[in-house]
Image (spheres, rainbow, N blue to C red):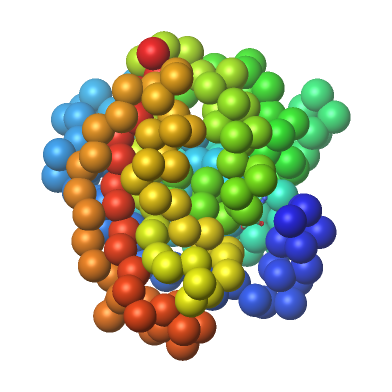
Amino acid sequence: MDLDFWIERWDNGRIGFHQDTLNPYLAYFYGEKGTDLAQRDKLKVFVPLSGKSKDMLWLSQNGYRVFAVECSKRAVVDFFEENSLNYKHVEKDQRALYQSNDLDTPIEIYQGDFFAVEKKDLAGVTDIFDRASLIALPEGMRKRYVAKMADLQDAGIRTLLVTLTYDTAEMNGPPFSLSEKAVYDLYSEHFSIEKLCIKDVLSEEKGLRSRGLTALTETVYKLVRR
Ligand SMILES: C[S@@+](CC[C@H](N)C(=O)[O-])C[C@H]1O[C@@H](n2cnc3c(N)ncnc32)[C@H](O)[C@@H]1O
């Protein structure tokens, strides 16, 4: 599954994964349970494989700084335009960076390949929000993604990881099913792992039901880089 696959999906509007509403786990763990509003400007959240997720807007409007990476130019431009944000496009280190001009919404999106992100790009990052990012990738790419994530992070960086689990005989990804065992196998070498919650989401996921799923759970983990 290469970048062209995703770029073509964006160009053809096949973006069923996009949610127009705020992710409820983000709202809970970074809103209600999050750091005091006054302290949040010290926190910077990295959103890998971001799409045009509304979560970035919410984070920036709720005191956090945001750095994201997304391969599709369409997704990045749509994010700024659909949210009526003024932005500029700059070339930095031969990369396409899109930055909000508004100090109230401190968002920077690197339009390019996640695997080309360098550790210096994550300077100041304290937190990572991974919703539909790891699970967008097929099993064969997971180890590379997690190894890259481990390389990019200093000790102490926290990740909120949202996964889906279903019977792979019923449906092919994306999104790809990830078992709890797979999460521990992938992350335990470099990360501490805490399972925060698990929820039956079959009734909420009409699109995935129509693809044949008869059972579907969502699990949320907190990872901390050791
Ligand atoms: C399933 S979508 C999830 C988007 C977002 N996390 C959300 O919650 O809506 C996966 C996104 O990753 C992007 N993507 C896939 N592979 C990528 C890569 N190697 N580098 C950067 N972006 C990538 C795709 O264009 C797509 O927007």
- Specify the quadrant of the image occupied by residue 200: bottom left
Image x and y of residue 118, in percent = 68, 22
Q: Residue furthest front?
A: 169
State which quarter of the image contains the C terminus: top left
Question: Looking at this view, is 176 or 157 the one in front?
Answer: 176
**158 lies above or below 18:** above
Image x and y of residue 122, in percent = 56, 23
Image x and y of residue 8, in percent = 78, 68
Image x and y of residue 97, in percent = 71, 38
Q: Residue furthest right?
A: 94
**142 lies above or below 219:** above
Q: Residue at x 40, y 65 (%)?
A: 166
Left or right of residue 108, residue 222 in this image: left
Q: Residue at x 24, y 24 (%)?
A: 39
**218 lies above or below 39:** below
Left or right of residue 88, residue 151 in this image: left
Q: Residue at x 58, y 70 (%)?
A: 172
Question: Looking at this view, is 203 or 101 the one in front?
Answer: 203
